[in-house]
């Protein structure tokens, strides 16, 4: 009799454990299914970099630490690309093959669209630049995803009297015009970044950009003075501007922003 009750007890415990395990698995699957992916399309100022390029970093590299675990950031940005070359290389198509309803596509281009000497990348701000941006917008919307335009982050450029200078010409305004016409949210990263540079001034901004003395870092033994690309500190500051911009747009994504900015 005791053996019979013992076996029944083992059986009941096994059933309970299986049910509990099944519930955990179900909850895990449900949690994965509710996760949102934020895709990034952009250039070298957005891209991820390997350790042998440290401390160089793009703002997209820092973005995952700004969100909770429900957000997946897929950084598809590639150095040297423009709106045009990114599409022509099939990189937008690859994003659109993966993106789902409720996901986001952040789009930052301009640095390489400006290169009039290179027909494979150059776009006119009044015509082809806007045309290509619309391809990103339409592609995302056709998949039920939410596009967000991000005006190009400013380069480090100061006048002799210490005034931060614009370097992107008509491209930021051209992007904002597309945003108005297509009713697409826009983060004005151009203005936000320039305001920060003006606040810090010529010397302190070097701590944001890839300015290193000879022998200061093993990856750059001869030193480097790069007014376009960021050190990790600078990339993190720009990423904070992105999440501030998202919060300002009052999008559902904002509820997943970590209060401490991932610090």
Image (cartoon, rainbow, N blue to C red):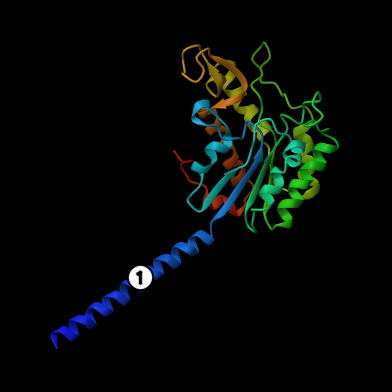
| Residue at which label 1 appears | 20
Q: Residue furthest right?
A: 127
Q: Which of the image's four quarters has the N terminus?
A: bottom left
- When asked about the image quadrant of residue 246, the answer is top right
Quick one: 218 or 216, which is closer to the camera? 218
Horizontal placement of 159 versus 205: left or right? right
Indicate the position of residue 36 as horizontal and vertical percent values.
57, 54
Horizontal placement of 134 versus 108: left or right? right
Indicate the position of residue 251 as horizontal and vertical percent values.
62, 52
Q: Is residue 67 above or below residue 237?
A: below
Quick one: 161 or 3, which is closer to the camera? 3
Query: Looking at the image, which residue is at 50% across and 26% down?
Result: 52
- When asked about the image quadrant of residue 7, the answer is bottom left
Quick one: 202 or 111, which is closer to the camera? 111
Q: Is residue 253 above or below residue 119?
A: below
Query: Looking at the image, which residue is at 67% across and 31% down?
Result: 191
Indicate the position of residue 80 as horizontal and vertical percent values.
68, 30
- When asked about the image quadrant of residue 117, the answer is top right
Residue 54 visible in image: no
């Amino acid at each position: 009799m005791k053996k019979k009750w013992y076996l029944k007890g083992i059986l009941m415990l096994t059933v309970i454990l299986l049910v509990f395990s099944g519930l955990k698995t179900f909850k895990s699957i449900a949690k994965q299914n509710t996760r949102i992916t934020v895709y990034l399309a952009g250039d070298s100022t957005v891209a991820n970099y390997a350790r042998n390029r440290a401390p160089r970093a793009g703002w997209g590299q820092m973005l995952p630490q700004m969100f909770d675990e429900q957000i997946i950031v897929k950084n598809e940005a590639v150095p040297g690309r423009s709106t045009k070359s990114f599409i022509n290389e099939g990189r937008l198509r690859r994003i659109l093959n993966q993106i789902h309803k409720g996901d986001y596509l952040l789009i930052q281009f301009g640095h390489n669209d400006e290169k009039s000497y290179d027909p494979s990348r150059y776009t006119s701000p009044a015509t082809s630049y806007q045309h290509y941006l619309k391809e990103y917008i339409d592609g995302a919307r056709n998949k039920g995803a939410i596009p967000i335009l991000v005006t190009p982050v400013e380069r480090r450029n100061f006048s002799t009297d210490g005034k931060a200078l614009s370097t992107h010409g008509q491209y930021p305004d051209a992007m904002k015009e597309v945003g108005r016409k297509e009713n697409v949210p826009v983060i004005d990263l151009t203005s936000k970044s320039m305001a920060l540079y003006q606040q810090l001034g010529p010397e302190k901004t070097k701590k944001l950009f890839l300015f290193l003395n000879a022998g200061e870092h093993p990856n750059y033994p001869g030193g480097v003075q790069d007014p376009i690309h960021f050190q990790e500190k600078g990339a993190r500051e720009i990423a904070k501007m992105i999440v501030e911009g998202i919060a300002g747009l009052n999008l559902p994504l904002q509820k997943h922003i970590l209060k401490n900015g991932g610090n």
